[in-house]
Image: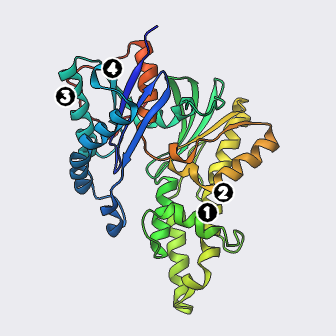
Amino acid sequence: MRDIIILGIESSCDDTAASVLRNRYVLSSVVADQEVHRKFGGVVPELASRAHQQNIIPVVDGALREAGCSIGDLSAVAFTRGPGLLGSLLVGTSFAKGMALASGIPLIEVNHLQAHILVHFIKENDREGKEPDFPFICLLVSGGHTELVIVRNHLNMKVTGRTIDDAAGEAFDKCAKIMGISYPGGPLVDSIAANGNPGRFSFARPKADGYNFSYSGLKTSFLYFIRDNIRNDPDFINNNKSDLCASLQKTIIDLLLEKLALLSQDTGIREIALAGGVSANSALRAGVRALAKKYDWNVFIPEVKYTTDNAAMIAVAGYYKYLKGEFTELDVSPAARLRY
């Protein structure tokens, strides 16, 4: 059987990424991030789309060179159709369409969130990692999304719970900004929390029906808590930053773990996976491992390099779609709110 070589292109937010996979094995993975957003405390959509235009040709060229491939070697080009920032998605979509048209290779659209889940099926030549058996539950947590997904096969996924307002990653970043921590705040909160007492402070724990999540109330609670304490002690944040970060992190993670455990108990599914940028959080990883011992779960946690946006996940999703013959027409348009 001829090798299936997929070029993946990811441009949903502020990272321009390209990756080449041969039969699920990573040959290359190149990412260009955008430092310009740090001084604004968050991603500026217009600046992001302009940076994608500058980065996409050298990133794709770099991925092909690193993989030792030419365009003629490719079986298909896969790209992120959505969800994401429309301007950013448009750059990746247009580039992939142009490449497919010019080279005569199939075009494959990929849902960004499904791709995050499929990182568990990426292979690398220097390791043979274990893969979850179907069905499994995936807790997908990022700056823009918080979902519980039952995965029945590589392309059959059902969202059973999602945030009704703000995502967990957004709660990390917004609360970090309140404390004067630079963007992106989530990784810095995790680092600072390592030296703090997670039981020192208490914040609101918003409730949501079923397996859904809510974080808006937590952000408001945190804001008012900081405001009230600064009145009595102007240096309250600096004097208590480690404990604040640890207590905030514990609250955010506990809400995630409670719903994850509930869904596992209700469905009887003990194959549990994490995905998304927040899955790099040390407290979340430790919490899931602790629950694995308690409930006899088989847990799958991605390497940190595959938690954030990358194109290897787009390529592996494209691989499974290629096997099914699920190709995309050239009149496809990006979709900022694409669901699955």
Q: Which part of the image, by quadrant, shows the C terminus?
A: top left
Rendering coords of residue 142 (x, y %): 49, 49
User: What's the amino acid at mark 3?
Assistant: Gly
Rendering coords of residue 200 (x, y %): 70, 74
Mark 2 nearby-residue class (10 Å; few <14, some 14–19, many ≥20): many
Q: Where residue 249 is drawn, which disc sits there? A: 1
**What residue does disc 2 label?**
283
Rendering coords of residue 214 (x, y %): 53, 53
User: What's the amino acid at mark 2?
Assistant: Ala
Nearer to us: label 3 or label 2? 3
**What residue does disc 4 label?**
73
Residue at 43% in and 42% down: 310
Mark 2 or mark 4: which comes first in sequence? Answer: 4
Mark 4 or mark 1: which comes first in sequence? Answer: 4
**Is residue 159 toward the left or the right of residue 136 in the image?**
left
Q: Is residue 151 above or below residue 292?
A: above
CB contact under 8 Å: marks 4 and 3: no
Instruction: Kindly indicate the quadrant of the structure image that contains residue 183.
Output: bottom left
Residue at 51% in and 61% down: 186
Compare residues 339 and 12 and report the one nearer the observer.
12
Query: What separation in Å lies between label 3 and label 2 (alpha carbons)?
Result: 43 Å
CB contact under 8 Å: marks 2 and 1: yes
Q: In the orientation shown, which residue stands out farthest toward the top?
A: 1
Compare residues 304 and 2 and report the one nearer the observer.
2
**What residue does disc 3 label?**
98
User: What's the amino acid at mark 1?
Assistant: Gln
Query: What separation in Å lies between label 4 and label 1 (alpha carbons)?
Result: 46 Å
Q: Is residue 324 above or below residue 26?
A: above
